[in-house]
Amino acid sequence: MYSSANVSERQAQAPALAISTVIFALRSDPTSGRSEIWLPLVRRIRQPHLGKWALPGGPLGGSESLQDAAARNLRETTDLEPTYLEQLYAFGGLDRAAAQRLVSIVYWALVRPDQAGLARESENVRWFRASEAAGLAFDHDEIVAYALERLRGKIEYGSVAYHFLGDRFTLAQLRGVYEAVLGRSLDPANFRRQFRSAKDISATDEVLQGGRNRPPRLYRYTGPVATAPLPRPAEPAPPPS
Amino acid sequence: MYSSANVSERQAQAPALAISTVIFALRSDPTSGRSEIWLPLVRRIRQPHLGKWALPGGPLGGSESLQDAAARNLRETTDLEPTYLEQLYAFGGLDRAAAQRLVSIVYWALVRPDQAGLARESENVRWFRASEAAGLAFDHDEIVAYALERLRGKIEYGSVAYHFLGDRFTLAQLRGVYEAVLGRSLDPANFRRQFRSAKDISATDEVLQGGRNRPPRLYRYTGPVATAPLPRPAEPAPPPS
DNA sequence: CCAAAAGTGTTTAGAGTACACCCATGC
DNA sequence: GCATGGGTGTACTCTAAACACTTTTGG
């Protein structure tokens, strides 16, 4: 199949190939009102790591692209459609799984948590705060940490933040997304200036009623819908191996 | 092996898994003296795409990590050690290869072209200017384009530029790297200022003799040696699918 | 001396930051 | 009125860019 000289030497035991997905959504803390990052995990129902929580995943179907497999995977565990989906990294260390050699191609996704999706919890599927997702099966702790790193990196450059939100949002909500992802609070005045002049966002003539303060204006994201991505690069950083 | 419900349904024909590597080096044009990006390609010696040029690659060995496989692959075709090696992307489209489903995990590397390495050309291994590497086998045109995009993105942020150069270099040589990668000329005065204050580079007390102008000072890279990478992220951008 | 690259200085424009201040709403 | 977040203005700092200028070498 390939070009280099020795093709058939080293493929005694072909490694298994699987797809996993790190799915992020925002939920606001009922007391503080601040947004927090959550992700769904799946309980393992067989060895190894039986009973531990793990990233949703499964084998790659024979007639689906890598991205399709990740999207399917996402629908199967959350019943939600991704608003953003991007490849994270291919993990192939020798020590990842005990029995057989396993290569996992991991995607990360953003979803808008509506009633249906977040309600879909069960004995074996549960949402966790990203900050509390520890002790996962395999090397999934590191994968989640790396996905968060990528999310942080990408929110500062690209336009992923909008994919956490609905089609109308206030600048305060958008700022909440940034604050949740970056883990620090941002100056409202400066944030406003930066994003009012951002070209892939535009003001509507509506305001959000019902708050107990001055009703804020609603904005709309008008940039590209990057469910299947295509934006500009910068680099990933290989994760903790 | 994995957690989601239906494990054994879709894995009728397991996809083949291969590693490929995009290897970049700089060579200076003998007439203009400007640096240019080159990469080695391998001629295919079997169907499909027999006779076309392709990225060096091959199957993943059963007892090597993904990165080790890429490094081996690189040594086998160029006899050089990588000064930088990083995962690029996992390509798994359905239309990539005719016969069997193929998933390729692609790495990109930088090397310092010494006599040995660049001389290692043969009937089936040849170096090409990156700008002239077109009409390659499979989807390798797009992979090379994406690797160049990543290189450009990463040179502006990270510290990959030094990995094209030897351990002593002038600021003009370093600027040549940037100009070759970014494809535009840079102001020597401003370039100097930026990089003299960069913290992972330090001046030596030597100068480069033998030019026909004022002898320039030599500098040394003192930052982390990222052959096996670990730096900070920002994001990749999924390539043209 | 002359050409050419090495290296320095100065000016300007823009982006990010800090923070004082006014506006509109619910209570 | 008053508390609170929405929204505006302004001053300051830092960096990149543009570009004039001096220095040091080989020929």
Image (cartoon, coloured by chain):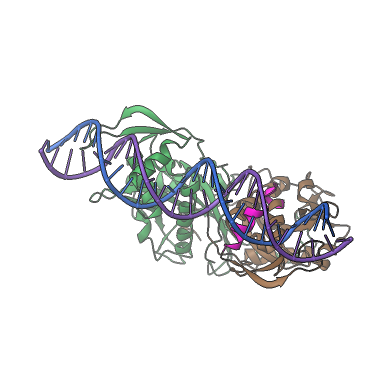
Chain colours: A brown, B green, C purple, D blue
Q: Quadrant of residue A98?
A: top right
Residue B164 appears at what percent x and percent y?
40, 43
Q: Quadrant of the C terminus of chain B?
A: bottom right
In-image side of B229 versus A165 (left or right): left
Q: Quadrant of residue B5?
A: bottom right
Nearer to the camera, A80 or B63: A80
Nearer to the camera, B118 or D26: D26
Q: Residue at x 71, y 49 (%)?
A: A144
In the image, is residue B112 part of the stretch drawn in magenta?
no
Nearer to the camera, B101 or B234: B234
Q: Main secondary structure of the magenta part?
A: helix
Say if D1 sits above or below A205 in the image.
above
In-image side of B98 versus B76 (left or right): right
Q: Quadrant of residue B216?
A: top left
Q: Residue at x 85, y 55 (%)?
A: A30
Q: How many marks?
A: 0
Residue B113 visible, this angle: no
Residue B115 appears at what percent x and percent y?
32, 41
In-image side of B171 versus A239 (left or right): left
Q: Residue furthest top?
A: B205
Give the magenta-colored segment's residue range.
A180-198
Q: Residue at x 22, y 51 (%)?
A: B31
Residue A191 visible, this angle: yes
Q: Quadrant of the N terminus of chain B?
A: bottom right
Nearer to the camera, A109 or B119: A109
Residue A191 appears at what percent x and percent y?
64, 55
Residue A220 appears at what percent x and percent y?
66, 69
In-image side of B151 versus B189 (left or right): right
In the image, is residue A186 part of the stretch drawn in magenta?
yes
Q: Residue at x 46, y 52 (%)?
A: B151
